[in-house]
């Protein structure tokens, strides 16, 4: 949930369901982040955000490894009128990871927490900006076998930005980190880095940051060899269209050791991710990752290549789209059966001896939205087969001001085209036409229209506006308004009506005259 002010200097608060944090901690990176965090720009005075996310990981062949992961994260950002701003984030994980030693697939449970504070000051000319940040990262493993990895990192950073073009800035800075291990204190060290670079946001489609620097890693224990060398950090994103984009991350930096006997390692890598949003219900991403790790203290170099991977949502038709093989049905299949089916299809002319792992990352419930003249508007979960009448009943029923029309906007899976379904509520509710009581589907948007009205004024018992009904005559409208008063001029009733955008007055109307929406019926006083 996100809470933010609507603008500078006001007290209006807005709530929204927007995910503001997209970062993840990295266990071996000093300070807990693989790449430096970029402070998000915000036009609002302040905003707050919080989220708890459980995750169920299931393995097709080794169910003994099935487990729950938990994430809790929050953000607070405040912008002063003077050009000073700050934000604070906290990200907590309770999760499991594979051993990472290249020998076995043991899972080790750990808890890690990242606290990160950034404050910036921008000059009145907006050409200069200074940024200071402090971060604390704490890592603790549950298994004593890997307790040598437990540590606490504290880091400080200072960066100066100079905007030499409206969308491009040069930057220079320094970063210091103190890494303290709980038990493996021989690996305690201090890391200092100097860097310069460029940051750009040329268009709304293209943005990024590049930093080139020099790192020194000095260990407290003289028995451990110090390290130094140049560092690289690249973060860039380009959106080709609203539905297709590419992210590129490149890095060269020192990491804390994940192996006993090694003090640290130098990691060089690149991560290229292609994102494709097929429609509102599902999207996929294809990543290529290459990483090379050179360990300090032991004779070991690791090289990693990414496999073909994708993340998809199951459509309302129980299908998914997999790279190379296209759309496949997963209806009534277990996780292991889905993996076996994809392996079989990839082996049929695409890959040699493919191995496929399928993980459930999110159990997404089916939901629909209802708005308009309903007592409790909002989004509701669809449990099983839900008809239109059951859906509006769950939302508290329609209001007294509801009209006779309900509109359902429905998105088709194939081409994201929206179908518009119109229901006659009078036929459905009053006349009992069951054929109109259709099933509500996932992501349906239901809108209950407001009824048309007419007005009765003058010498009637209850002058007011009234809900319009079909086949309404003047006498029926006056009757609903309580009838004539004792001094009403019954033969001089007039109707004020808008015709083709012009107001017209119809004098001495007949009592059987049909009434139209927005008509104003005026009953004058009789003077005799």
Image (cartoon, grey):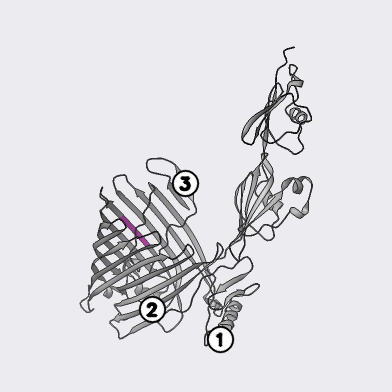
Q: Which residue was labeled with disc 3?
A: 14
Crowd band around label 2 with a 10 angstrom C-alpha radius: few (<14), some (14–19), many (20+)? some
Q: Position of residue 399 (x, y in %)?
A: 66, 41
Closer to us: 477 or 214: 477
Q: Residue at x 26, y 69 (%)?
A: 212
Residue 243 x, y percent position in the rendering = 49, 64
Let me know if residue 117 is in the magenta part: yes
Q: Nearer the viewer, residue 349 or 216?
A: 349
Q: Is residue 115 above or below residue 456?
A: below
Label 1 belongs to which residue? Answer: 349
For the record, the magenta segment spans: 114-118
Does residue 181 appear in this view? no
Q: Is residue 210 left or right of residue 510?
A: left
Instruction: Evaluate whether residue 61 shows in this view.
Output: yes
Whole-Å distance between the Cαs marked 1 and 3? 53 Å
Judged by depth in the image, the label closer to the viewer, 2 or 1, is: 1
Going 28% across and 74% down the picture, which residue do you hit?
A: 187
Q: Main secondary structure of the magenta part?
A: strand
Residue 290: assigned label: 2
């Amino acid at each position: 949930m996100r809470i933010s002010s609507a603008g500078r200097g006001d007290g209006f608060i807005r709530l929204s369901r927007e995910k503001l944090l997209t970062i993840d901690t990295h266990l071996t990176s000093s300070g807990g982040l693989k790449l430096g965090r970029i402070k998000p720009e915000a036009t609002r005075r302040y905003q707050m955000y919080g989220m708890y996310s459980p995750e169920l990981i299931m393995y097709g062949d080794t169910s003994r490894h099935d487990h729950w992961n938990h994430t809790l994260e929050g953000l607070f950002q405040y912008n002063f009128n003077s050009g000073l701003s700050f934000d604070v984030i906290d990200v907590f994980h309770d999760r499991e990871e594979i051993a990472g030693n290249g020998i076995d697939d043991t899972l080790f449970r750990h808890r890690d927490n990242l606290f990160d504070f950034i404050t910036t000051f921008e000059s009145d000319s907006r050409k200069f900006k200074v940024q200071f940040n402090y971060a604390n990262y704490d890592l603790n493993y549950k298994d004593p076998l890997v307790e040598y990895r437990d540590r606490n990192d504290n880091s400080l950073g200072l960066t100066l930005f100079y905007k030499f073009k409206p969308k491009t800035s040069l930057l220079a800075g320094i970063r210091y980190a103190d890494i303290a291990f709980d038990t493996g204190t021989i690996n305690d060290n201090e890391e200092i880095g100097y860097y310069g670079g460029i940051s750009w946001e040329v268009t709304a489609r293209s943005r990024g940051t590049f930093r080139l620097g020099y790192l020194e890693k000095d260990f407290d224990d003289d028995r451990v060899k110090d390290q130094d060398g140049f560092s690289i950090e690249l973060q860039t994103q380009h959106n080709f269209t609203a539905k297709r984009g590419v992210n590129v991350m490149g890095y060269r930096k020192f990491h804390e050791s994940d192996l006993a006997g090694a003090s640290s390692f130098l990691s060089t890598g690149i991560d290229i991710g292609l994102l494709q949003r097929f429609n509102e219900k599902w999207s996929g991403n294809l990543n290529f990752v290459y990483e090379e790790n050179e360990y300090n203290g032991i004779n070991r170099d690791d090289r990693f290549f990414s496999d073909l991977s994708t993340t998809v949502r199951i459509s309302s038709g129980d299908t998914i789209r997999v790279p190379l093989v296209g759309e496949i049905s997963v209806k009534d299949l277990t996780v292991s059966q889905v993996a076996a089916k994809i392996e079989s299809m990839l082996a049929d002319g695409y890959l040699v001896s493919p191995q496929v792992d399928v993980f459930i990352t999110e159990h997404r419930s089916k939901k629909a939205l209802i708005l308009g003249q309903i007592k409790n508007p909002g989004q509701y979960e669809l449990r099983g087969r839900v008809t239109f009448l059951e859906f509006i009943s769950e939302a508290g029923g329609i209001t007294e001001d509801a009209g006779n029309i309900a509109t359902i906007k429905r998105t088709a899976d194939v081409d994201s085209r929206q179908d518009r379904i119109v229901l006659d509520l009078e036929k459905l509710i009053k006349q009992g036409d069951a054929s109109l009581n259709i099933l509500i589907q996932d992501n349906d948007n239901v809108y209950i229209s407001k009824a048309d009205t007419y007005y009765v004024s003058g010498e009637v018992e209850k002058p007011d506006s009234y809900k319009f009904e079909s086949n309404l005559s003047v006498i029926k409208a006056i009757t609903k308004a309580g009838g004539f008063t004792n001094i009403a001029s019954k033969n001089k009733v007039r109707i004020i009506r808008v015709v083709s955008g012009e107001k017209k007055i119809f004098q001495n109307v007949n009592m059987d005259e049909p009434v139209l929406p927005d008509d104003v019926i005026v009953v004058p006083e009789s003077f005799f």
